[in-house]
């Protein structure tokens, strides 16, 4: 059968277009950047769903993925971390699914990714922050964008500045990112008041940051204010380093009463108190931190009836000078997570930069009626520059040190076990040498648990109770 010329032409035209398209496609793919240094640029590294839903909630956010290069790129895979079990759903440039493969982005161009989440925030089994990640793979490199949504009803503080606020106590507060009381270039001379009974949960690396402002925590013995990580599984109950801690920078007068601060990197980080301003700690417990329970640099701190213990580095570090007063405090370090060579307490009055030594004087560091103890031989280090006298005094204290004592140590019980009833609570047994050995000059009528003290009382933050 003879085929007519127009039909042959039609077939030839289609074949030509197919060959040309294949050739162009092949040529285009050959021009993809395949260098291992290629990185994607995201409009956000964390996508936060900051709406608190009253019932089952569903909302979406979007972000862009940009090719910053002058040649096209091909993303091998875009994958939702928890797959089909994730509460999140994604749509990548019009393609829905938990995995999208071989997605091309032209030179100097972008794609949109839409993310949706459905969460029941009243479900008590949910964590406070429900997270997943979207993973990107390109030329052997792996990058990711974090997805975060609120999983329960609470007050959420996400990278915000608070000023002149008093927090409510009817729901927990969750810190995500930086919650700042005052902030450089934004605001200072601010204040935050946290009433008795407030519970604050902090997400990974979250920090409560006080800058040229004041923090007033008004806990009571019956209703202490509690700071802790937001992972509430039993396996995280004693896991240090879950959040950063409370950071004071050039802070104004601040007072913390009856607070429990636990499971951070540095429970209290106090850096250079401003002028005559100081931090007062009354009946504060700070423990189980991966770095320090109290870390101060050139600060002014007045601490009574307080406990600082279990830290990966120092229970209390007083560095770069400052002015410090401790009475009826327990500074102890039994750290079992790893080996520790650093002391429970360190005092330092200098630093070195580019070969030059700068002196930061210790105006005073007085410890009265306190315990400084732990599980290594020397739990007190005086890192003071030769010829620059540090004004320190230990009076009616129990200390553990392998160094000789001098006239700055008065009425000391040295290298004797305090006989704690428990390594976690640090309360005293009836056989403790600390009982009735405190200096009456610095008498405090009640202890950390609001128990009545005899006079003279017991050394440390706790009075022995039969």
Image (tube, rainbow, N blue to C red):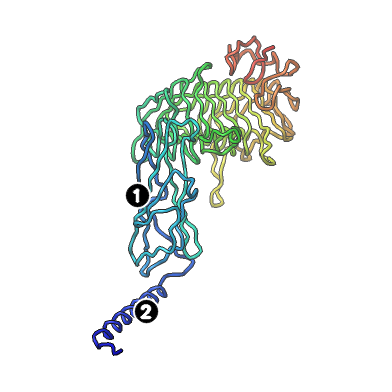
- The front one of 88 and 223 is 88
The residue furthest left is: 6
Q: Where is residue 224 drawn, in percent x and y? A: 51, 21
Q: Quadrant of residue 5?
A: bottom left
Position of residue 436 relative to residue 165, above or below, is above
Secondary structure type for disc 1: strand
Q: Where is residue 347 drawn, in percent x and y? A: 61, 35
| Residue 171 placement, left or right of 263 | left
The residue furthest bottom is: 2
Q: Residue at x 43, y 21 (%)?
A: 195
Badge 1: few (under 14), some or many (20 or more) residues near its Cα, within 10 Å?
A: some
- The front one of 189 and 386 is 189
Q: Earlier in the sequence, mark 2 or mark 1?
A: 2
Secondary structure type for disc 2: helix
Mark 2 or 1: the one toward you: 2
Q: Quadrant of residue 120?
A: top left
| Residue 312 placement, left or right of 67 | right
Q: Residue at x 38, y 48 (%)?
A: 115
- Can you tell which mark lies on residue 23? 2
The residue carrying mark 1 is 62
Q: Where is residue 84 drawn, in percent x and y? A: 47, 48
- Can you tell which mark lies on residue 340? none
Give the alpha-carbon distance from disc 2 to disc 1, as whole Å.
35 Å
């Amino acid at each position: 059968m003879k085929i007519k010329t127009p039909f042959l032409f039609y077939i030839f035209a289609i074949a030509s277009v197919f060959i040309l398209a294949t050739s162009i496609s092949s040529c285009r793919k050959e021009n993809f950047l395949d260098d291992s240094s290629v990185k994607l640029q995201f409009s956000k590294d964390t996508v936060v769903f900051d709406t608190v839903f009253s019932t089952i909630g569903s909302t979406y956010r979007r972000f862009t993925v940009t090719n910053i290069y002058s040649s096209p790129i091909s993303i091998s895979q875009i994958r939702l971390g928890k797959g089909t079990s994730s509460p999140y759903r994604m749509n990548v440039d019009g393609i829905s699914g938990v995995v999208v493969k071989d997605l091309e982005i032209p030179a100097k161009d972008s794609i949109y990714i839409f993310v949706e989440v459905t969460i029941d925030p009243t479900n008590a089994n949910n964590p406070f922050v429900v997270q997943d990640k979207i993973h990107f793979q390109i030329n052997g490199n792996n990058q990711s964008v974090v997805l975060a949504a609120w999983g329960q009803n609470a007050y959420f503080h996400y990278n915000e500045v608070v000023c002149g606020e008093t927090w409510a106590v009817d729901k927990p507060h969750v810190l995500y990112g930086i919650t700042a009381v005052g902030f450089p270039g934004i605001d200072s001379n601010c204040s935050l008041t946290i009433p008795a009974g407030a519970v604050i949960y902090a997400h990974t690396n979250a920090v409560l940051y006080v800058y040229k402002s004041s923090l007033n925590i008004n806990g009571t013995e019956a209703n202490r204010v509690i700071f802790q990580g937001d992972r509430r599984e039993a396996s995280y109950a004693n896991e240090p380093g879950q959040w950063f801690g409370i950071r004071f920078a050039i802070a104004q007068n601040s007072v913390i009463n009856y607070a429990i601060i636990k499971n951070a990197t540095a429970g209290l980080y106090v850096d250079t108190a401003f002028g005559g301003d100081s931090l007062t700690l009354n009946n504060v417990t700070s423990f189980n931190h991966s770095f320090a329970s109290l870390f101060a640099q050139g600060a002014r701190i007045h601490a009574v009836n307080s406990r600082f213990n279990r830290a990966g580095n120092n229970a209390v570090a007083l560095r770069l000078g400052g002015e410090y007063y401790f009475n009826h405090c327990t500074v102890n370090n039994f750290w079992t997570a790893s080996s520790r060579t650093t002391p429970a307490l360190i005092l330092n009055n200098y630093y070195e930069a580019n070969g030059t030594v700068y002196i930061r004087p210790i105006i005073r560091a007085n410890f009265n009626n306190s315990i400084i103890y732990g599980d290594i031989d020397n739990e007190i280090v005086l890192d003071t520059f030769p010829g620059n006298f540090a004004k320190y005094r230990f009076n009616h204290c129990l200390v553990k040190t392998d160094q000789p004592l001098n006239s700055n140590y008065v009425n000391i019980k040295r290298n004797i076990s305090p006989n704690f009833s428990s390594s976690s609570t640090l309360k005293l047994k009836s056989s403790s040498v600390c009982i009735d050995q405190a200096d009456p000059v610095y008498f405090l009528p009640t202890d950390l648990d609001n128990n009545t003290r005899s006079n003279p009382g017991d050394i440390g933050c706790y009075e022995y109770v039969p």
